[in-house]
Amino acid sequence: MPGSKLYFVTDAHLGAGEDSHQRELELCAFLDSIRHDAAMVVFLGDMFDFWFTYRHVVPRGYVRLLGRMAELADAGVELHFFIGNHDMWLFDYLSSQMNITMHDDPTTLHFDGKKFLVGHGDGLGHLDRRYDCLRRVFRCRLNQRLFALLPEWMTFGVALGWSGSSRKGHIKKNPTIFEYQGDDREGIVLYCKQRLSQEPFDYCVFGHRHTPLVRTIQSSSGNQSTYVNVGDWLLHRNYAVYSDGQITLHDWQT
Ligand SMILES: [Mn+2]
């Protein structure tokens, strides 16, 4: 029987780093621990450091996490998955295996009479034109078809190497990259404020930034909302839970 709570988890980047298997085990233990009281679980993206679903073949690994997700879905828990910038090529694999709703972009979710604006968080606020361009290239259907024609050793070799070196490069270039950059320099916050100026949301919940944060934000039209960044399951073991009219951030301990 599904419970009454709404859980958010994000950015596990499984496949990256030597502790990937340990992170997966801990994520599974966390999912087991919420199974009895979860009504809805939202995966906010970048759960995998790289993924490409070929027509008949998927990447090896992650069977424990995939199994736990399927178990939750089979138990009647409502599941949502927002693709991130690392696992944007999941396509319909998860939704073909279990009852889960996939999302490419931020969307509105309703729960317990509250309205949530939810998304992964990359490419928002138009602060980085170069990335906006890259995102369009990666999300173009024709480019995805061409990519699928390359042999797997080439695509996965290049992608996994690039993913790791791009992360290290970003941190080297800007050591404070995971710190809150200020209301006018956080793409997600700029995007949320713009959405808030058009319609009210009780909560704006995102991932991608790797640092857990709860903050009140206000649009130019005066609409207020609570912005929650769930943090990550890579450097931390963060999750957020909404229950009884309150959203709280936690660090899961084994
Ligand atoms: Mn991301």
Image (tube, rainbow, N blue to C red):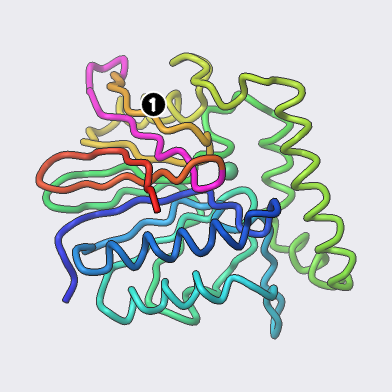
Q: Quadrant of residue 174?
A: top right
Q: Residue furthest bottom?
A: 56
Residue beneath the point at 26% across and 47% down? 241
Residue that numbered label 1 is attached to:
194
| Three-letter residue code for mark 1 | Gln
- The residue carrying pointer 1 sits among few (fewer than 14), some (14 to 19) or many (20 or more) residues within 10 Å by Cα, namely some
Residue beneath the point at 70% across and 28% down? 171
Residue beneath the point at 36% across and 24% down? 193
Position in image of residue 114 (x %, y %): 16, 45
As for residue 106 lying within the magenta part, the answer is no
Q: Main secondary structure of the magenta part?
A: loop
| Closer to the camera in the image, 200 or 207 | 207
Position in image of residue 226 (x %, y %): 26, 29
| Closer to the camera in the image, 184 or 143 | 184
**Drawn side of residue 146 relative to residue 91, left or right:** right
| Closer to the camera in the image, 7 or 86 | 7
Range shown magenta? 219-234
Query: Ligand 1 appears in which quadrant?
Result: top right
Position in image of residue 219 (x %, y %): 31, 19
In this picture, is 167 found above or below 36? above
The N terminus: image quadrant? bottom left
